Each structure stands twice: as structure tokens, then as C-alpha cells.
Amino acid sequence: MGIELTWFGHATWRVRSEGKTILVDPFIAENPACRATIDQLGPVDLILITHGHADHVADAATVANKYQSTVACVYEIATWLQSKHQVANAVGMNLGGEKNFGFCKVKMTIAFHSSELPDGSYGGNPAGFVVTISGKRLYFAGDTALFGDMQLIGKLGIDAAILPIGDLFTMGPADSVEATKLICPAVALPSHYNTWPPIIQDANAWGLLIREQTRAKPVVLQSGESYSL
Ligand code: NI
Ligand code: MN
């Protein structure tokens, strides 16, 4: 079975395979780079949240409550979604842990960032995710700096790595190229850029660096576009 990976701008990604849908970091209504509405995204089985910042959790509860989606995130955010937003199926995880959701497996990886929820609540540790689905492995790095242990994540065998390139709040393009060297994915896709002026980047220039300096194939999507793997 193939996988359809769609970017909705910023760090919002949708994975579809075997009739199931995963949504990562739902930031839709207030996302200046997202052209789709929550309704247009369709039913969501599983929502993954990398950390508590508004540009990652903004629409998580709305989507989860609309579709009775399961939400996987760090324990503190799961508790917050349950107690403050009446989300019924929030699964609290923590760094290094993996959970089998039946149609996919999700492993929570480290990320170097911060994590405060929109109302000021403590959001626990920021994270990334390795998603195993339909025999492929996708790595969503989340908001993070470059770190050497990405090499260990690469040892899992990553088919597609979704990496921030926006700089300022996360890795910039050069560090993202270094990350790709450590992870050795088949495909690298840029994320978390061009949403607002402070994180504008030339993704095609990044793609050239990926092509020149790594073995990965760069895939630069426009908001709303999909890639099949
Ligand atoms: Ni953030
Ligand atoms: Mn962010």
C-alpha cells in the first residue's frame, strides 16, 4: 500500500494510507500558509502533536472532537487536552516510547526546543515522531535544533524525513542539510518555513544543497500538494 503525504503549510502534515489518516501538528484556521479548511482535511484517525506551541496545537482539539480522533502527544499535553478541551482519546507518551495504534506505530523522539501551551500551561518536553506505516518509516523532526543523535534515529531506516528549515525558531537550511546527512533518509521534505516573514527561506536552494551534499532526494511541496511514497 502506498502512502500519500500532504503538506498544509507550516508544520501541518497529513499521512494517508490503507484508508487511515494521520494529521501532524494541526494548525489550519489561523495558519496563513494553509489554504484548506478543517472540513476539507476530512476525517482524521490519529493526530500527532510535537509540542505545545500554538502553531502546532491550534486546531488539535477542534479536529479531535469533530472526528473522535485519537491524539498522541507528550503526557502533559494529553492531560491538558483532556481537562481543558474535553478530548476523549488523548494518549500520553514520553520521549523514547513507542505505541502501536494498529494501522501504524508511533515512536516519540527527542527534539531540542521549548514547549508552552497557548494558555501558559506547561507543555512537557518537545518531541519528534517516527511513524511506521505500510512498511515505510517517516520521521517528523518537529521544531528542533540540529542534534547528533539524529544519527541514531537514522539507524531505524527512514524513508522520508520531514525537517524544519525556517531558522530563527528551529534549524535553518544549512543545519537541515547536516541533519539529512545524519539521518540518511531516502527523501527529505522541508517544513516550518515561509509561514511568516521571519522564517522565509528559499526551499529550492535548500533542495539543491540536499542534492549536492546528501544521498536523499529533496521533495519541495507547495501548500496543499502531496507526495506519494
Ligand atoms: Ni515551536
Ligand atoms: Mn513552531
Image: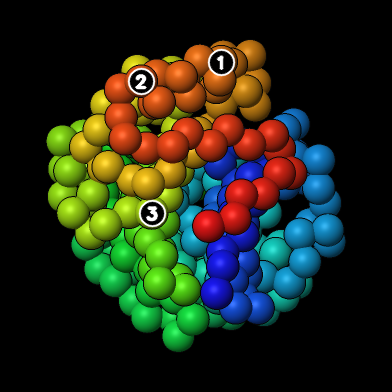
| Quarter of the rendering occupied by the N terminus | bottom right
Residue type, mark 1 in image:
Asp
Q: Secondary structure at mark 1?
A: loop
Q: CA distance from mark 2 to mark 1?
A: 16 Å
Q: Which residue is mark 1?
A: 202
Name the outermost residue toward the bottom. Answer: 102
Graded by Cα atoms within 10 Å as few (under 14), some (14 to 19) or many (20 or more), the crowding at tag 2 reads: few
Residue on which disc 3 sits: 159
Query: Residue 130 location, x and y as percent?
Result: 35, 59
Secondary structure type for disc 2: helix
Q: Nearer the viewer, mark 3 or mark 1?
A: 3
Given this view, does label 2 or label 1 mark the residue nearer the observer? 2
Say if residue 22 shows up in the picture.
no
Cα–Cα span, label 3 and label 2: 19 Å
| Res 212 label | 2
> Front-most of 176 and 204?
204
Left or right position of 4 against 218: right
In terms of sequence position, does the residue under pointer 3 or pointer 1 come before the other? 3
Which residue occupies 50% across, 15% down? 205
